[in-house]
């Protein structure tokens, strides 16, 4: 009979030591099985009463809206950091408020895509390929230029919202229509109002 060694690590049922079993298994991404679901496809896993064609159309539209919203969100943070000038304090705070609101929209849109059985676009590389919002320079720009750039981005999103809301309504996807109108469109319209007031050319001292 083998002599037991009380200082040896305990063995689990598979015969490996407990110390070995708590090690994370690294590098699984380099020899991964095929993905659970390919980007661009929709599953019918969740029973929400919508056919595949409708889900596919809504997911395609929502992924475009998601990429553009993530880009606008990041544009707000860029401008929050880089803004200078006499309106610094107002714009610094306003840009960050809008960044937070756009971040909330990003989550709402992405989760709607999951509910429809799609795969939400997520990473900056992929977002950069899909978005239609023009790429800003890395440089610091003057506040009026920042504001004009933001308003252009809002308008691109809002024009798409009108198209996507009508498509979703026609297809009977009321949930997507509601997200596009009640969340994305309303938020963007309100932000356009607040941002636009900063580039109205009006005298501040003498009434006209
Ligand atoms: Fe900040």
Image (tube, rainbow, N blue to C red):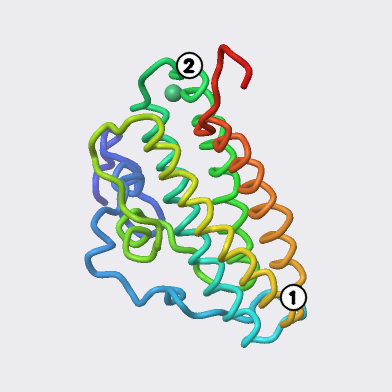
Mark sitting earlier along the chain (1/2): 2
Q: In the image as oriented, which residue stretches furthest toward the front?
A: 208
The front one of 168 and 188 is 188
- The secondary structure type at the circle numbered 2 is helix
Q: What residue sits 63% from the left and 39% below the top?
A: 193
Task: Look at mark 1 in the image and give the residue it sits on.
Answer: 169
Residue 19 falls left or right of residue 43: left
> Gap in Å between the C-alphas at discs 1 and 2?
41 Å
Give the foreground label among 1 and 2: 2
Q: Residue drawn at (55%, 44%), measured in percent from left and top?
A: 102
Q: Nearer the viewer, residue 86 or 97?
A: 86
Element type at mark 1? helix
Quarter of the image with the C terminus in it: top right
Give the vertical position of 53 relative to 124 (above or below). Answer: below
User: Residue 41, position in %: x, y?
Assistant: 49, 80
Q: Which picture quadrant has residue 109?
A: bottom right
The 10 Å Cα crowd at callout 1, few under 14, some 14 to 19, many 20 or more, is some
Residue shown at 63% from the left, 86% from the top: 52
Ligand 1 occupies quarter: top left
**Horizontal relation, residue 190 to residue 110: left or right:** right
Residue 133: image x %, image y %? 40, 57
**Mark 2, residue position:** 89
x and y percent of residue 131 in the render? 40, 61
> Residue 86, percent across and down?
42, 15
Residue at 66% x, 77% y: name it. 167
Q: Residue 207: which quarter of the image? A: top right
């Amino acid at each position: 009979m083998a002599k037991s060694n009380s200082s040896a690590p305990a063995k689990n049922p598979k015969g490996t030591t407990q110390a070995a079993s708590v090690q994370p298994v690294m590098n699984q991404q380099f020899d991964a099985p095929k993905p659970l679901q390919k980007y661009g496809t929709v599953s019918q896993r969740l029973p929400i009463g919508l056919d595949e064609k409708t889900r596919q159309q809504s997911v395609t539209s929502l992924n475009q809206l998601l990429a553009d919203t993530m880009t606008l969100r990041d544009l707000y943070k860029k401008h929050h950091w880089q803004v200078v000038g006499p309106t610094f304090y107002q714009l610094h705070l306003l840009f960050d408020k809008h960044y937070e609101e756009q971040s909330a929209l990003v989550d709402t849109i992405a989760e709607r895509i999951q509910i429809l059985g799609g795969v939400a676009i997520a990473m900056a590389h992929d977002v950069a390929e899909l978005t239609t919002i023009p790429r800003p320079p890395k440089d610091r720009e003057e506040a009026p230029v920042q504001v004009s750039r933001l308003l252009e981005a809002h308008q691109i999103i809002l024009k798409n919202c009108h198209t996507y809301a009508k498509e979703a309504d026609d297809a009977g996807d009321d949930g997507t229509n509601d997200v596009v109108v009640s969340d994305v469109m309303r938020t963007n319209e309100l932000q356009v109002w607040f941002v636009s007031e900063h580039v109205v050319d009006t005298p501040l001292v003498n009434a006209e």
